[in-house]
Amino acid sequence: MRRTIILFTITMLALLGTAHAQPDSLWSRTYGEYIEECLSIIQTEDGGYALAGFTLSPHADDYDMLLIKTDAEGDSLWSRTFGGRGFEECNSIIQTEDGGYVLAGFATSFGAGSSDMWLVKTDAEGDSLWSRTFGGEGMDICNSIIQTADGGYALAGYTESFGAGQRDKWLVKIDADGDSLWSQTFGGRGLEECHSIIQTEDGGYVLVGDTDLFGARVCDMSLIKTNENGELIWSRTFGGREDDRCYTMIQATDGGYALGGYTRSFGAGIFDMWLIRTNADGDSLWSRTLGGISYDECNSIIQTDDEGFVLAGYTRSFGAGECNMWLVRTDSEGDSLWSVSFGGENWDECNSFIQTIDGGYALAGYTRSFGAGEGNMWLVKTGPDPTSAPPESFIPHPCVFILYPAYPNPFNSTTTIRYGLPYPSNVLLQVYNITGRQITTLYEGNKQAGIHTTNLIANVLPSGLYFLQMEASGEQFTQKVILVR
């Protein structure tokens, strides 16, 4: 790992409407010595980051899964590789409730076919505990993994071994030990791929990707809703006469969905970032294209506290070089507020990004402009988004259940309590006194995934020691707070 002084190019575009202040860049880091790329990033419980993707060794003609753990400043703490003599790649990473990690992607060194879905479970230090493969004789790839409400996992990607067509979307449900429970395929006689999955409050799943129903190699965005057993409830497609693809999706605060990818059918350039907003039934409410005269693509999306959106990917229309990381902020109607690009003279791309606990952003991908090798993992950290509310109101998506330290503590009359949910859950938040008597219930009910905030107002309570207790999805957390008059 080496520190890098990078060239940041801030691009304010007339086509993006009224100018707003962008978040300031704080630092960047590169990782690797030869060819490395980050495909998925999470912020970990300790405030640092876990980056996952692949590495190509200069001494061997094969790729291995690569996992790098950093501190909050992006400095590498340790790294691990996983693989055999073939090609292995991690497309999605999550942190599990035990502090370890699950990496999901594909392997050609192991399994039954030309490539199989590959799942690796590690401990908190990144050491492998077990791995599983899923697949048949053809090519089978996992693009996205989530931990489900029952403690198991759901893997989504595509299969060429099973299903109705040349390539079908594939959803595999496994238990906490990685053993398969069931799987479902979705598709026709053409090509289908799934790139992202979420679990909904009803226990079902929503998958997005692209569909080429008739093998004409002109794809539409695809959105699928299933029940808890993976059985199809409804499906929707979005697109025009040209190629339109979806790489990322979130459930919005109103229960609908926001899809991000690119479109060749609409927009200003060769292809543009495409943002589609739907209702809870998958019906389109509106769509927006973002970009210039060249290539612009969205690989990752989040919703902000004001119900707007932030999209990240790459741009070849704007910026300093051949291709730059691109971050675009919109309001709740998808109209652009600002954009910022990061990069040098060569090719730099964002594959995954997150909103961090301080209200800023962390963008991860790869760079050919900086670093030690032909292309290295690249992590760029920004400061808080000035167009958003204070950091305590941000809604990043934690990987585990967590009750953050109350602040202030000790407190005089009011203290703020924040807690994080990795998926939609029923939450019970209560306050007890030192004798164990319940004083009040701060919240009881369902909450979406994300970080949530509530206040303990102690106007009528006497000074002393109190206990905050949070219960969510069978887990319980307790914290001491001190009231001082």
Image (spheres, rainbow, N blue to C red):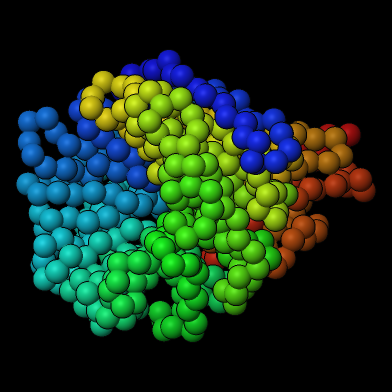
Position of 351 relative to 58 (above/below)? below
x then y, percent, for residue 76: 35, 27
Is 299 on the left-hand or right-hand side of 478?
A: left
In this view, which residue lies farthest toward the top? Answer: 5
x then y, percent, for residue 389: 74, 40
Q: Nearer the viewer, residue 391 or 418?
A: 391
Is 177 on the left-hand or right-hand side of 331?
A: left
x then y, percent, for residue 304: 65, 48
In this view, which residue lies farthest toward the right? Answer: 460
Q: Nearer the viewer, residue 231 or 246?
A: 246
Total count of labels: 0
Q: Is residue 187 visible?
A: yes
Position of 218 relative to 442 (above/below)? below
User: Which residue shows up at 8% across the image and 39% down it?
Assistant: 61
Residue 74 appears in which quarter of the rendering? Answer: top left
Q: Is residue 432 visible?
A: no
Is 212 on the left-hand or right-hand side of 57?
A: right
Q: Nearer the viewer, residue 317 or 238?
A: 317
Q: Quadrant of the C terminus?
A: top right
Q: Nearer the viewer, residue 349 or 451?
A: 349
Position of 137 relative to 457 (above/below)? below
Q: Quadrant of the N terminus?
A: top left
User: Which residue shows up at 77% across the image and 57% down it?
Assistant: 442
Position of 85 relative to 247 (above/below)? above
x then y, percent, for residue 257: 58, 65
Is 253 on the left-hand or right-hand side of 111?
A: right
